[in-house]
Amino acid sequence: MAVPARKVSKTRKRMRRTHYKLSAKPVTKCDKCGAIRRPHRVCNACGNYKGKEELKIEDN
């Protein structure tokens, strides 16, 4: 089994891990109500997707 010849320093390990980060999720506006939503998903505010009512949202 292969064993590392030298210990990987903290700096080298951290430089390698600098690319492990979160990115902001894309958002779009709903065509009908203008609420912010994720692309290719039903709008939580009005329940529409691609101009059709997919969910019935009740007002409380």
Image (cartoon, rainbow, N blue to C red):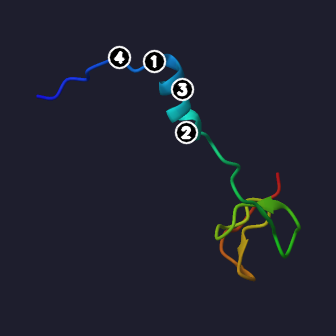
Outermost residue toward the left in this view: 1
Residue sitting at 49 percent across and 26 percent down? 12
Q: CA distance from mark 3 to mark 1?
A: 9 Å
Say which element carries label 2. Answer: loop
Q: Of label 2 and label 3, which has the lower sequence position?
A: 3
Mark 3 or mark 1: which is in front?
A: 1
Q: Specify the amino acid type for callout 1.
A: Ser
Number of other residues with Cα within 10 Å of mark 3, as a class: few under 14, some 14 to 19, many 20 or more:
few
Q: Of label 1 and label 2, which has the lower sequence position?
A: 1
Mark 1 vs 2: CB contact within 8 A: no
Residue that mark 1 sits on: 9
Q: CA distance from mark 4 to mark 1?
A: 6 Å
Residue that mark 4 sits on: 7
Outermost residue toward the bottom in this view: 51
Q: Of label 4 and label 2, which has the lower sequence position?
A: 4
Percent coordinates x, y for residue 35 in the rendering = 85, 61
In the rendered structure, find residue 41 and report the number of the disc placed on it.
none
Mark 4 or mark 2: which is in front?
A: 4
Residue that mark 3 sits on: 14
Percent coordinates x, y for residue 46 in the rendering = 79, 66
Mark 3 vs 1: CB contact within 8 A: no
Note whether 44 is above or below 49 in the view shown.
Answer: above
Residue sitting at 60 percent across and 39 percent down? 21
Number of other residues with Cα within 10 Å of mark 4, as a class: few under 14, some 14 to 19, many 20 or more:
few
Mark 1 or mark 2: which is in front?
A: 1
Say which element carries label 4. Answer: loop
Residue sitting at 69 percent across and 67 percent down? 39
Q: CA distance from mark 4 to mark 2?
A: 21 Å
Note whether 4 is above or below 35 in the view shown.
Answer: above
For residue 5, side relative to residue 46 (left or right): left
Q: Specify the amino acid type for callout 4.
A: Lys
Residue that mark 2 sits on: 20
